């Protein structure tokens, strides 16, 4: 995340992280719905592939959630 924030700063843009803290059971429910409604722009993601990513994901720290203004 910090890499993307530094890129924004180099471009002269401000950055802000938006995070929705969704429980695992809700993520899996949404995945099941998504998998059942596949289209040309989506693909199947097996549950057994999603669970390790959920466990791996690190929630943003309070500092990361603070908007970063442009430095002058």
Image (spheres, rainbow, N blue to C red):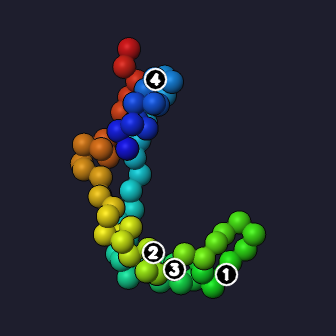
- Which tag is nearer the camera, tag 2 or tag 1? 2
Rounded to the nearest angstrom, the CA distance separating label 3 from label 2 is 5 Å
Mark closer to the chain start, 2 or 4: 4
SS of the residue under disc 1: loop
Measure the C-alpha gap from mark 2 to mark 1: 18 Å
> Extreme top residue here?
72
Q: Nearer the viewer, mark 1 or mark 3?
A: 3
Q: Is residue 49 above or below residue 58?
A: below
Rendered residue at 46%/81% (across/down): 47
> Which comes before the other along the chain, label 1 or label 3?
1
Callout 2: SS: helix
Q: Which residue is mark 3?
A: 46
Determine which residue is flagged by label 2.
49
User: How far apart, in angstroms, are the residues tagged by discs 3 and 4?
Assistant: 38 Å
Residue 64 image-quadrant placement: top left
Q: Position of residue 4 (x, y in %)?
A: 43, 38
Residue at image mark 1:
37
Front residue (pair 63, 44): 44
Q: Nearer the viewer, residue 47 or 65?
A: 47
Q: Position of residue 61 (x, y in %)?
A: 24, 50
């Amino acid at each position: 995340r910090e890499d993307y924030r530094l890129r924004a700063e180099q471009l002269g843009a401000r950055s802000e992280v938006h995070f929705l803290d969704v429980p695992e059971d809700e993520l899996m429910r949404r995945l099941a719905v998504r998998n059942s409604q596949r289209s040309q722009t989506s693909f199947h993601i097996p549950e057994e592939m999603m669970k390790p990513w959920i466990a791996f994901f690190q929630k943003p720290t309070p500092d990361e959630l603070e908007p970063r203004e442009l430095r002058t």
